[in-house]
Image (cartoon, rainbow, N blue to C red):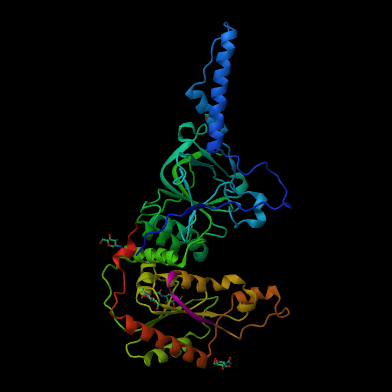
Amino acid sequence: MVKPRERATTMVKPCQQSKSQPKTTKSTNNLLSPKLFIYLISISALLFILFHIQSLHHHHVPPRPSSAAETAAKLRRSVTFLPLKDLRYFNKALVGHTWFMSSLYDIHEDGEVQFQQFPSPVVDGDDRILCLKGRDTHDGSWNYYGLAWPEALPENATVMKGVSFVSYNHYDYGNIWHGLSALMPFVAWHQIQGKCEVPERWILYHWGELRLKMGNWITTLMEATFGAPLHIEAFEGIGDGQPVCFEKAVVMRHNEGGMSRQRRMETYDFMRCKARLFCNFTMPEPASAAVRMTILMRTGARSFRNEKAVVEIFGEECAKVAGCRLTATYSNNLTFCEQVSLMRKTDILISPHGAQLTNMILMNRNSSVMEFFPKGWLELAGIGQYVHHWLASWSGMRHQGAWRDPDGPPCPYSAGDRRCMSVYKGGTIGYNRTHFSEWAKKVLNEVKTRKMEGATQVTANQVHECSCI
Ligand SMILES: *[C@@H]1O[C@H](CO)[C@@H](O)[C@H](O)[C@H]1NC(C)=O
Ligand SMILES: *[C@@H]1O[C@H](CO)[C@@H](O)[C@H](O)[C@H]1NC(C)=O
Ligand SMILES: *[C@@H]1O[C@H](CO)[C@@H](O)[C@H](O)[C@H]1NC(C)=O
Ligand SMILES: *[C@@H]1O[C@H](CO)[C@@H](O)[C@H](O)[C@H]1NC(C)=O
Ligand SMILES: *[C@@H]1O[C@H](CO)[C@@H](O)[C@H](O)[C@H]1NC(C)=O
């Protein structure tokens, strides 16, 4: 359930530009602001008065009143387009106002998603809309954005109706983790600020460069979440440099940043619920205390070297717990709905580090994850190896730890050499019977206890999770 929130709206201020950075552009705030608008109007009025004073003295000069059309023409010409990617912030691409649309502020309520919306929902009378000249797929500094008054759009502008989602992703949309991180804030917006509004189109940027597709899993998840196939905008039929303005636009550039854990969990609850509806799993599952374990196997890189042994070890522990069922399957050839179905019936997900683990968000809340890494990852894989710890926390799951294989192929370079990662990256994962048995026993008992306590609670698909306010 989504609780009512305090409306403590604040604007996120851009961080101070450091002195050492070269100043290549005069000002970050040179878009037409309400102040500038008033300024322009005042100038027009002043000119009008001056003309009249002049005409009193020189009766031969015909009066030239400033008309609304002239003001509109001035406003039209005053729309300033700035590069989508601001190279001055290259070193702080993700900080504060970011290098994407760097002159604009986000709206941020405490614990809520950070976003931009045009026309502004928080500044009365600022009904400027977002315009883009943004179809370049190679260099984000050749793509531009600007704000325009709807009655004075830039020359030759095309107007696109409905809500447009404009996404900034620092990584890529093919990767499930990075794709999901970039898109989940739109789901959060849809739930609350958007009041269930569904996007007409998605405009995807990476470093300001237009992207035309995202991975299949994430595409299907978004289709399920928003109840319609996605239209990913390619600006076909729009000439280079021709502006496109959006009746209503929502821009996300901070992923889940700023969201409370509660709000993150609600957002994942919503996607899970929608995915189940999409796949027609509408009947609530009978409450049961039986524990269901699933081993989701990979082929190739990060597969289990000895699948049979791994399945056997977990099978033996499962067999010791009354009502426990073990399923072992490959993730690569399951359809989206087969994954939704399997995860709905999984309490403990056992799987190597990899994209398939993102399926964890489709389990019921409080389900468990056990993760496995090949040799060398702890030392060399960087912070990215923890993404499934984070995802478990954000989606309300329990990450029950990881096992790291001490054995693997030798690296020809000295220990700790970065180049070793290329050897470890494609590594496979062995097993330690003693460790796996003890770990499985511990997690099984914990889950069993929790399920017995919670057996009276409704498990799946409470309808309220699928609704927005
Ligand atoms: C608008 O379109 C017309 C016709 O295609 C073209 O001649 C003109 O240069 C365009 N104006 C701008 C500012 O691009
Ligand atoms: C769900 O059911 C509807 C109506 O029977 C059907 O049109 C749709 O194809 C089904 N969806 C899936 C994913 O099976
Ligand atoms: C799914 O993929 C696995 C591994 O590639 C393979 O062994 C299995 O036969 C496949 N199953 C189906 C139904 O194609
Ligand atoms: C998950 O576990 C927490 C803490 O044990 C509990 O308060 C919460 O009700 C559980 N949530 C669900 C959906 O079972
Ligand atoms: C296997 O795991 C056990 C328990 O964690 C540990 O004591 C033992 O050293 C491990 N064996 C190997 C070969 O790593």
**Would you say residue 212 is visible in this rendering?**
no
Pick the quarter of the image with the C terminus.
bottom left
Residue 448 location, x and y as percent? Answer: 37, 86
Point 39% across, 89% down: residue: 318
Q: Quadrant of ligand 4?
A: bottom left
Q: Is residue 191 magenta?
A: no
- Quick check: 220 left or right of 57? left
Please tell me whether residue 241 is drawn above or below residue 14 in the rendered image: above
Residue 36 location, x and y as percent? Answer: 56, 35
Please tell me whether residue 10 is drawn above or below residue 45 in the rendered image: below
Viewer-side residue, 448 vs 372: 448
Pick the quarter of the image with the N terminus.
bottom left
Q: Residue furthest top?
A: 60
Q: Which residues are magenta?
A: 395-402
- Quick check: 324 left or right of 238? left
Residue 134 location, x and y as percent? Answer: 55, 44
Of helix, strand and loop, which mostly describes the magenta segment?
Answer: strand
> Residue 378 lies in what quarter of the image?
bottom right
Point 54% across, 19% down: residue: 48
Point 36% across, 67% down: residue: 337
- Quick check: 369 left or right of 420? left
**Would you say residue 397 is visible in this rendering?**
yes
Residue 311 location, x and y as percent? Answer: 44, 86
Please tell me whether residue 383 is drawn above or below residue 291 in the rendered image: above
